[in-house]
């Protein structure tokens, strides 16, 4: 199963070009859509999820025409939006059961089995009788996945799912997604580079509605391997270095700026070669685009 996006464009009424001629093939497995805030990720996710229309272009999932066969697509879609409302005074089990009814699972026995299995799968079974209002961020996200799985989706879209999760909750959420990626097209949209590095077999970077890069994380890292150099400098030297070198990024380490630069040859001057990272790839692409 492949999700194919072809020449997709969307300009909002206010003139913002949220998607500019995006083409992408997304196979079964975990796919990371990486980009800064405002890049167009949610617009793309919502368009694939049939919640809004594009101006031009097409999307297919296997034989399905996503943009015209919306009803059919929704039957095989699981969607976890960036923000979703939960009824705080209802228990996880009751709400999941209710949502299952809405999805058309009318047989009570079948529904009970499914709800129980999904609560186990998302590690919420112990808390099934607790009200959702008392759930932590991670538990809410896992509940979001449980509801997205009610239809046994072939396509699962999760939009910025790890924002606000603590490291342990994030890990648990990752593990759950990885399991699902084995036989589903899972699209994870995020601005967190580590999410993609740790999870995804394929990825793309978008910015200002444009596709900057697509490929496998290890391959795109490989493309700049041996070209990344690093140096700890003084604060007042930062501007000078930025002008002198192709700077990838600068960040503070123990209060001092550490800069990463891109260079085909050893720049000397106290720089040391460091292994390339996905973050280096990401910032290189964004710098070239801005
Ligand atoms: P991301 O999810 O990557 O943060 P979005 O798809 O939400 O990006 O937004 C892409 C761009 O489109 C941003 O500049 C945003 O301000 C703009 N945008 C998003 N939704 C709307 C809308 N309904 N009307 C007008 N502009 C919008």
Image: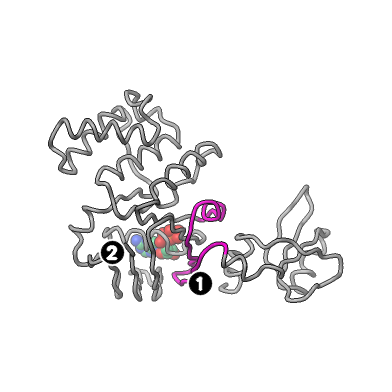
Quarter placement of the N terminus:
bottom left
Q: Nearer the viewer, residue 110 or 70?
A: 110
Q: Which residues are magenta?
A: 191-218
Q: How many marks?
A: 2
* Residue named by callout 1: 212
* Label 1 crowd bin: few (<14), some (14–19), many (20+), radius 10 Å: some
Frontmost of labels 2 and 1 is: 2
Residue at 16 percent across and 40 percent down: it is: 105
Q: Is residue 145 shown left or right of residue 102? A: right
Was residue 114 drawn as part of the magenta stretch in this picture? no
Q: Within the displayed image, which quadrant is ligand 1 positioned in?
A: bottom left
148 shown above or below 184:
above
Residue 227 in percent (x, y) is at 71, 70
Q: Residue furthest left?
A: 106
Query: How is colour applied across the structure in the image?
Result: one colour
Q: Nearer the viewer, residue 193 or 38?
A: 193
Quarter placement of the C terminus:
bottom right
Earlier-in-chain disc, 2 versus 1? 2
């Amino acid at each position: 199963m492949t999700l194919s996006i072809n020449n997709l464009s969307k300009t909002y009424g206010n003139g913002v070009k949220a998607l500019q001629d995006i083409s992408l093939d997304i196979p079964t497995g975990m796919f990371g859509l990486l980009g800064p805030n405002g890049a167009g990720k949610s617009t793309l996710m919502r368009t694939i999820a049939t919640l809004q229309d594009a101006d031009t272009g097409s999307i297919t999932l296997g034989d399905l025409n996503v943009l015209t066969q919306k009803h059919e697509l929704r039957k095989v879609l699981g969607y976890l939006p960036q923000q979703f409302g939960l009824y705080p005074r209802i228990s996880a089990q009751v709400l999941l059961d209710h949502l299952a009814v809405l999805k058309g699972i009318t047989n009570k026995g079948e529904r009970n089995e499914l709800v129980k299995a999904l609560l186990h799968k998302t590690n919420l079974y112990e808390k099934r009788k607790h009200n959702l209002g008392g759930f932590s961020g991670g538990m809410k996200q896992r509940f979001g996945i449980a509801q997205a799985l009610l239809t046994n989706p072939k396509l699962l879209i999760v939009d910025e799912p790890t924002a606000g999760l603590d490291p342990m909750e994030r890990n648990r959420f990752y593990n759950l997604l990885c399991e699902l990626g084995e036989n589903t097209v899972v699209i994870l949209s995020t601005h967190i580079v580590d999410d993609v590095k740790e999870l995804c077999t394929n990825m793309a970077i978008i910015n200002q509605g444009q596709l900057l890069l697509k490929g496998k994380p290890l391959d795109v890292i490989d493309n700049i391997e041996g070209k990344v150099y690093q140096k700890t400098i003084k604060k007042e030297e930062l501007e000078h270095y930025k002008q002198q070198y192709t700077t990838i990024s600068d960040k503070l380490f123990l209060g001092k700026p550490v800069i990463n630069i891109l260079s085909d040859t050893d720049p000397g001057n106290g720089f040391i070669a460091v292994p390339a990272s996905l973050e280096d790839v990401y910032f290189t692409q964004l710098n070239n685009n801005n």
